[in-house]
Every structure is written in structure tokens, then in C-alpha cells.
Amino acid sequence: MTKTLLAEFTAREGAEDEVTRLIREYALKVREEEGNVAFDVYTKTAAPRAYWIFEVYRDEDAFQAHLKAPYGAPFNAALVPLIEEDASVLTFLDEIDRA
């Protein structure tokens, strides 16, 4: 069963360009992970400092491998001072079975 989540955070005013640069670089690495199915980055049209990242991993093992990737901690350490939240807010999602 896939592991799906939505990660959300808001860039501090004036930090949008740096946050966008960081997330673009990070996305390139995550998308190369063997178990990654999707890593799609969005901003809200009405609030462009609000970022939403839709992530899908093949299964729980692939998600755990993602969490252990060596580039994750440096990315988060660089991101945290640039966002309003203490960290990305994660919402785990369950797909409704298709009829």
C-alpha cells in the first residue's frame, strides 16, 4: 500500500526565493529515490508564500528510506529558519478505494 502525505509550510516574508530554490533542489533528489512515486510542489494561488508538497511513496519501507536519506536533514535545517512554522506540517492521507 502506498504512503501518501501532504507537507505544508509558509515561507517567511522575503524568503520565498530561497525557499523555492531549496525545495526545487530537494525535489530533484527525492524524485530519484527508488520508492518515490510523486513529489509535487505547489504554492497557493491566493497565498504564494504557502507551499504544499504532495508526496507518494511506493510503501512504508520506501517512506522510511526517504526519511533516512542523507540530504533530508540538511534540507530541513536550511528550511526551518526560512518558514513561519517550527517544521513542515505533515498530513498523512488514505486513498478511498475506487469503486
Image: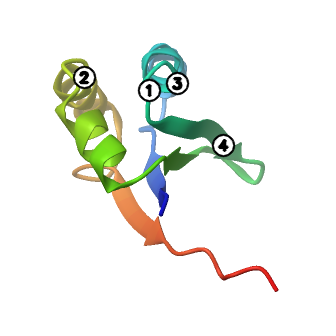
Which of the 4 image quadrants contains residue 15?
A: top left
- Using the image, tell me which numbered label, if any, was put on residue 78: 2
Q: How crowded is mark 2: few (under 14 residues within 10 Å), some or many (20 or more)?
A: few
Mark 3 residue element: helix
- Using the image, tell me which numbered label, if any, was put on residue 43: 4
Q: Name the residue under label 3.
A: 31
Observer-nearest of 87 and 14: 87
Position of 99 relative to 60 (above/below): below
Observer-nearest of 37 and 47: 37
| Residue at 46%, 53% in the rendered image | 8
Mark 4 residue element: strand
- Using the image, tell me which numbered label, if any, was put on residue 34: 1
Q: Which amino acid does label 2 sit on?
A: Ala
Q: How crowded is mark 3: few (under 14 residues within 10 Å), some or many (20 or more)?
A: some
Q: How far apart are marks 3 and 2 (CA)?
A: 19 Å
Q: Which amino acid does label 4 sit on?
A: Thr
Q: How crowded is mark 1: few (under 14 residues within 10 Å), some or many (20 or more)?
A: few
**Residue farthest along the right direction in this orientation:** 99
